[in-house]
Image (cartoon, helix red, strand yellow):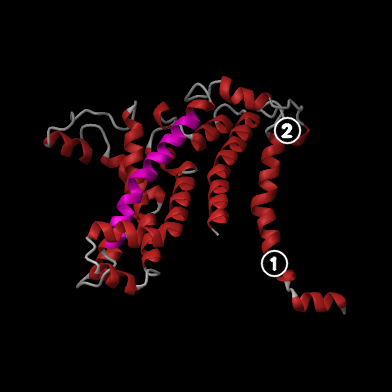
Amino acid sequence: MSILRWGTDRPLWMLIPCAVAMALVVLIPVILTVVLSVLNLNIGTLHQWLGAPFIGITNYIGAFTHPSVITAGAGTAILLSLVFSLLTTIVITPLGVLAAISVHRPFHGRAAVRALYLVPYVIPTFVTALIARIMFLNHDGLVDKVLAGLHIANVNTYWLIGPHAFWAMTLTEIWAAWPFIYLMTLAGLQSVPHEQYEAAVLDGASPGQMLRRVVLPQISGILKLGVLLSTLYHLGNFTLAYVMFSSPPPQSVDVLPIDTYYRAFSNYDFGVASAIAVITMVILLVPGYVYLRMSRMSD
């Protein structure tokens, strides 16, 4: 009877299916990755799997000192991932905010414009990468032809190889990801009381002052969450770089997910690949922890 009363007062048992699903999908793979990261697991010891020799932090050291088929070490991949994710987020945040503000007030055709803004976001990343690969083709791609016609760049810029590949990937990610910030901001704008707009207009506030002192303070919480989620997504984006470029891709796009993949399935060094995956998880946890601390302090 006590169990029944506990179940009636606090129906925590209803969380059991969710807890089991989280354990199967998240917890168990994370534990296995951590365990594999301290084992000498490669093509020669793969048949032993969890029985492979224990080597401690050697895989973590090897991730930074042993080259993969693309780059010299995980340090380069970490730097590229951070620059790629932060640069993309810095660019798309004002774009998304301005786009949300532009369709917040009613006007004729607003629904069509709102739907049009979402087109890049609803296209699958795989399709976006294929389209970008065609557009950035050397000499015959639309990007080269347009830039050469405007006398901005040479018709043979080679966007898909060499150092320009990083900028091709970043521009594609910006185009595909900015509607996420737009959606988050648009949702936040719905919570701003209309009376505050009216009061700002009566006080003679300019559009810029209204944005800085009325809109942004009201939506700062959801905007911070959007920036965090956007940054985490860019850090973990594997599909774009893998599909957009050749195999193996150029060194300038060797972000952490790509480096992990080629360590595992080209070098067949599964222990080092698992170590890089753990490093990636730690990097992803840092902004989340900072956000939770900021939210707790603001509360």
Amino acid residing under circle 2? His
Q: Is residue 295 left or right of residue 221?
A: right
Residue under the image location 36 percent in, 44 percent down: 90
Residue 150 visible to the viewer:
yes
Query: Foreground residue, 296 or 184?
Result: 296
- Name the dominant secondary structure of the magenta segment: helix
Amino acid residing under circle 1? Leu
Q: Quote the CA–CA distance across marks 1 and 2.
A: 37 Å
Q: Is residue 114 magenta?
A: no
Query: Label 1 belongs to which residue?
Result: 15
Decide: few, some or many residues near mark 2? Use Cα within 10 Å; few <14, some 14-19, many ≥20: few
Residue 75 in percent (x, y) is at 52, 26
Residue 194 in percent (x, y) is at 33, 73
Where disc 2 sits, the SS reads loop
For this orientation, the residue located farthest to the right is 1
Quarter occupied by the N terminus: bottom right
Q: Is residue 104 above or below residue 247?
A: below
Highlighted range, magenta: 77-101
Residue 236 in percent (x, y) is at 50, 43
Query: Label 2 belongs to which residue?
Result: 47
Query: Foreground residue, 7 or 101?
Result: 101
Q: On the image, which quarter does residue 140 sit in? A: top left
Q: Is residue 84 above or below residue 113?
A: above
Q: Is residue 79 magenta?
A: yes
Give the mark toward the camera: 1 or 2. 1
Residue under the image location 35 percent in, 39 percent down: 170
Q: On the image, which quarter does residue 40 sit in? A: top right
Q: Is residue 40 above or below residue 169?
A: above
Quarter occupied by the C terminus: bottom right
